[in-house]
Image (cartoon, grey):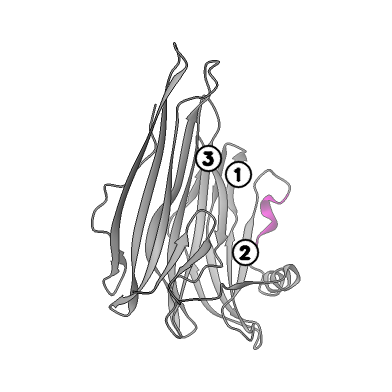
Amino acid sequence: MKTLQIVLNTALLLIAGNSFAAPYQTCSEQLQDSLIQKFKLTNPRFANTEAKTYQSCIHLDNQQKIQLIAISQPIAYKSYDDMEHDLNLYLIDSYQGKILQKYKAPETFYSDADHYDGAQLHTTRFSTLTDIDVVGIETSSSHQGGFTYSHSNLTLFKVNPKQPIKEIGGISMNDSGDERIGNCPENSNSEVRSILILSNKTTHGLQDMILKETKNQTKTNYKTCTSVKKQYKQQQTLKFNGQVYKFQHHNFLSIDPF
């Protein structure tokens, strides 16, 4: 079976067999800014604060007439550790100069104990089927302190100019955490990395995906400064049920709370 392997933390494509799908092309900064300004997609209300606006843009077609723009901007701000962001997607026909479809994420992204680090469209194609666009957007958060950790999540969307943008799945991508205590050369830490393998087999019109997880763990005895390393692996197949991608189980690998 030909497969397309997607390493999630870098969106790097590793090809097995003869399958190949060229990644989406990113928009030029000039085009991205002009579309955002033309359709007034951002609000400058918090422009003079620490709250950032995260925006990205990809071309969906080879003629570069159709663009998908993701914008996550602040909707409330009190301080660096107390703000809220939304997330919106816009499917735009820049040739005809009109917005084809809009999507507003139902959730709010908070910065409090965890700091919201933004949203970014992937250039990876999560479908190699003709005339079917499945795109991914990564959202991430982190925490700095005695226990430092980071987390990112991938949300998949089916995009079609003639249909509403539809969320079809969410996957925890990469987690990492470590203690910052003691004077040992290596602290206790753990990380979970995920890989998607995109199959040619389809279910309800979309390709099956194999989710592979790898956890690397280091536990340190701070009295002796000795460390024990372990690795855990597991995988499962994700199939589209006509509405969303379904997991076989939800017992995902996770970083250690220490």
Q: Which residues are magenta?
A: 42-47
Nearer to us in this view, 146 or 99: 146
Instruction: Residue 21 in the image: state x and y as whole percent.
Output: 51, 76
Q: Is residue 158 visible?
A: yes
The mark found on residue 56 in the picture is: 2
Quick one: 258 or 99, which is closer to the camera?
258
Q: Earlier in the sequence, mark 2 or mark 3?
A: 2
The crowd level at tag 3 (other Cα within 10 Å; few <14, some 14-19, many 20+) is: some
Q: Nearer the viewer, mark 1 or mark 3?
A: 3
**Residue to which mark 1 is pinned:** 77
Kind of residue sitting beneath label 2: Ser
Query: In the rendered image of this protein, does residue 145 appear above or below residue 132?
Result: above
Indicate which disc, 1 or 3, sits on the residue closer to the N terminus: 1
- Magenta stretch holds residue 88: no
Q: Which residue is mark 3?
A: 142
Decide: few, some or many residues near mark 1? Use Cα within 10 Å; few <14, some 14-19, many ≥20.
some
In screen coordinates, is 74 left or right of 151? right
Would residue 105 be visible to someone looking at this image? Answer: no
Residue at the (49%, 76%) spot, across then down: 20
Say whether residue 147 is left or right of residue 233: right
Whole-Å distance between the Cαs marked 1 and 3?
Answer: 18 Å
